[in-house]
Amino acid sequence: MTATMMTFTFEGRSVTAEPGQSVAAALWADGVRSWRRTRQGGQPRGLFCGIGVCFDCLVVVNGVAGQRACLVGVRNGDVVQAQP
Amino acid sequence: MIRYDVAVVGGGPAGLAAATAAVRRDARVAIVDAAPRLGGQYWRHRPGAEPAELRQARSAADHLPNSPVWFVEPGPGSGFRLHSPGGPVRADQIVLATGAHDRSLPFPGWTLPGVVTAGGAQALLKGHGVLVGRRVAVAGAGPFLLVVAAGLAEAGATVVGVFEAGRLRGYAGHPRALSPAKLIEGGHYARVLARHRVPYRRGHVVVAAHGDESVEAITVACGDRQRRIEVDALAISYGFAPQLELAVALGCDTRLDVDGSLVVAVDVDQRTSVPGVFAAGEVTGVGGSVLAQLEGGVAGCAVTGQAVDPRVRRKRNHARRFAAVMHDVHRPPAWIERLADDTLVCRCEEVSYKSLKRAVDLGATDTRAAKLLSRVGMGWCQGRTCGPVVACLTAHLNGRAPTVADHATFANRPIAQPVRLGELAEPGS
Amino acid sequence: MSDVVVIGAGMVGAACAYYAARAGLDVTVVDRGPVAGGTSGAGEGNLLVSDKPPGPELDLMLVSLARWAELDADVGGFEFEHKGGLMVAATAAGVAELNALVEAHRALGVQAELVDDAREREPELAPGLAGGAFYPQDAQVQPALAAARLLHAAGLAVRTGEVTGLDLRGDRVVGVRLGDDVIPAEHVVNAAGVWSGELSRAFGAPVPIEPRRGFVLVTEPMPPIIRHKVYAAEYVADVASGDADLQASAVVEGTPAGPILIGASRERVGFDAGRPLGVLRRLAAQAVALFPVLAGVHTLRAYRGFRPYCADHLPIIGPDPRRPGLFHACGHEGAGIGLAPATGELIAALITGTPPALDPAPYAAVRFAA
């Protein structure tokens, strides 16, 4: 698989992913458990339902906010940031 | 725009069986699916590892991937129009096979990162090859816990235990509802767990998760006894909640199933109350993939005017009876009294149990009022996660049992998926 | 025996009950559903002066606005916010109309100012707009909370049941029939919102109220990119229109909770719930035209409400001479939240015979009781 590994950045840091992996899966595999803070309580959130239902895992991908990290597939060179 | 005879919404077991049956009549069939790959939550696979069932269905029907339907409407004229990011689809008739997602119950600590649904842990593993944790507890109620725990153990995780809320005495009381296939399947997972020395604890409930930035430990209760277990992930599932928004948007009659879920009411041929709309699989009552495929087969025949094989109908009825026993045996535990005042009920809007109680004090006698007075269910997920919980809590706080109307409040989402305003504004979308 | 039975636990009914209770009357509130279960729970909670040309409705609104500030201090807890309204015009002709409106408003003491570059107030507005007007008094409340808090402050719980008719002695009202029960009462207030027309017919004192359908689109929660209530000048014409066809000029606003609300279509289609996609598309298109940045923003939800539309665009507030003891407080169309406090205060004054805050004549039911 190594030959086809992809790379993206999360908050400026480089993360690798296997083809077909979601942003959430790649972050999780990289040891990242949360990538958002709640608007009221500032609590950490990451993956919960894992299938696009709960919207807990929102991220900004290439400037587009409100993406579900568990659904959006990694593409080489993606710039991923925390959802404001 | 192509006009299909049948649009099957959902590419899981029910939808694929419906499409496979419908094309036998040379019907022009579309499988409109939210996911990039067919299979639904059940046949999750890595790219290039497609099971045979999927190849067969895909070759016979038009597969429209990445097409979560955000709006469905009757007409113009006869038939229906379905709107998704893939563009609008017209169809004379619809089979709704939109499936279900994990039903979550709130408890102190359930919003900590590392606490995931069992379906989430499964999707991470089967769909993306990633383990949810190294030291994992699997908890909740239902046979799905076995499947997830076995998968995690096989993939190398240390599963510290499977904590099943039910005491499982009920199966023995219903020998006629149990099929040999079910027993063999259950036995397979039990053997995997035994091989990996994973303890299976009945009558055990996870009552709290602890940690700061991520889950570090859980408290498991059995009766009055409690113990703390170190984990780095908790996969939890209390059955499943059907995805009903399209059925409700179309005006299909609904009912409460034996597990307390709101489901679409169907007749013996999987017909809903709305002419031209059929439903199959978890949306008509949670029952697993075997039942879903049988229902899909019946719906696919009925929607194209083919006679339904009485043997298939009998098998389906048997599987439905088994599902009822399963729900009875794997009852969720008493959970309301375990909520703390600051336990979040609604994850998106961060509405605590205390805020919900305050809304009821202010006059929220039903779930719509509870929503208006507390913002519960108003956030990103639109009550998909908290809806069943809020329906139960609002009814409980008003001293009554939840009704169809309590649950229907949250299933009523005319915009069935978030849609960009720019796309909505586009007349042809 | 109650002094007053208020039918309807929406914003208008809650305000009537609150002011009647404050006047020392014994009040019972009845509704077939919970508080704010109808139109009040399906609107944005507008308290607008800007969309009301000079006339009796504006007079009522100006009294109401003062009462809302008092209620915020005395009761509170309903997200009262003086966000200000920004009306924009795309053309020179539109600006000329705005000029005239602002001038007329200012003559009546309404705070209003012309704005050359609307983007100084709302940076995300589309370029190329011809001009605008800013109304700092325009405000907002969360209507369901407001209705609930007022009832709570007055110590009133909603009695649930379906009103089936009045209990009469001759023409005189002596009670309300609630299912199989009768609630004896000296005064009955018809504040049933969109259902008040139907009730008034059952009471033998018909008033012409019918539903006018409206939709609101709700976006994902956003950082505060839109600060005021922003709408195109054409909206005022839509509000005043008696046309049964679809009127839609988007009103766009941010909320303290984060989502942006996009209203406000108006159609007279009875209680028809169906086929809203065309309306939603139009609202979305107009919102994006005003604020191009919204094209990339997700809408999560659309909700539908029915406004209690009155044929002459004025609410009906006051006693019905055909049924002594019966009062109407209905027909506020899309302005019911804003106009509720003044309406409630007026009803309480008319019941107790105390001097009202403003001349009740323009709103009198007698105009339909010929």
Image: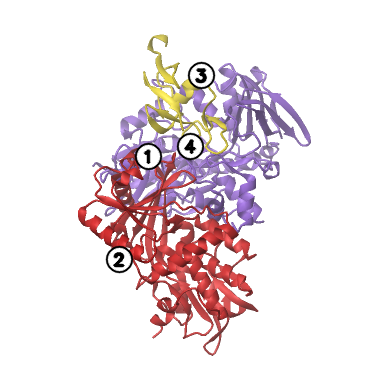
- Disc 3 and disc 2 on one polypeptide chain: no
Horizontal and vertical percent position of residue A72: 41, 28
Residue drawn at (61%, 57%) of the image: B362
Give the residue number, with chain letter if any, for mark 1: C297
Query: Crowdedness of circle 2 by 10 Å Cα count: few (<14), some, many (20+)?
Result: some
Amino acid at dot 3? Ala
Q: Nearer the viewer, residue C38 or C189?
A: C189
**C48 above or below B292?**
below
CA gap, disc 4 and disc 3: 21 Å
Q: Nearer the viewer, residue B128 or B348?
A: B348
In yellow, which chain? A
Give the residue number, with chain letter if any, for mark 3: A29
Give the residue number, with chain letter if any, for mark 2: C241
Examine the image and state in which quarter residue B198 appears. top right
In purple, which chain? B
Amino acid at dot 2? Ser
- The subunit letter for the residue under badge 3 reads A
On the question of residue B323 being in view, the answer is yes
What colouring style does the render use? by chain
Label 2 with label 1: CB-CB less than 8 Å: no
Tell whether B300 sits left or right of B378: left
Give the residue number, with chain letter if any, for mark 4: A53
CA gap, disc 3 and disc 2: 59 Å
Q: Nearer the viewer, residue B372 or B305?
A: B372
Query: Crowdedness of circle 1 by 10 Å Cα count: few (<14), some, many (20+)?
Result: many
Amino acid at dot 1? Val
Disc 3 versus disc 2: nearer the observer: 2
User: Chain C is shown in which shade?
Assistant: red
Horizontal and vertical percent position of residue C107: 35, 65
* Quadrant the N terminus of chain B occupies: top left
Horizontal and vertical percent position of residue C318: 48, 78
Amino acid at dot 4? Val
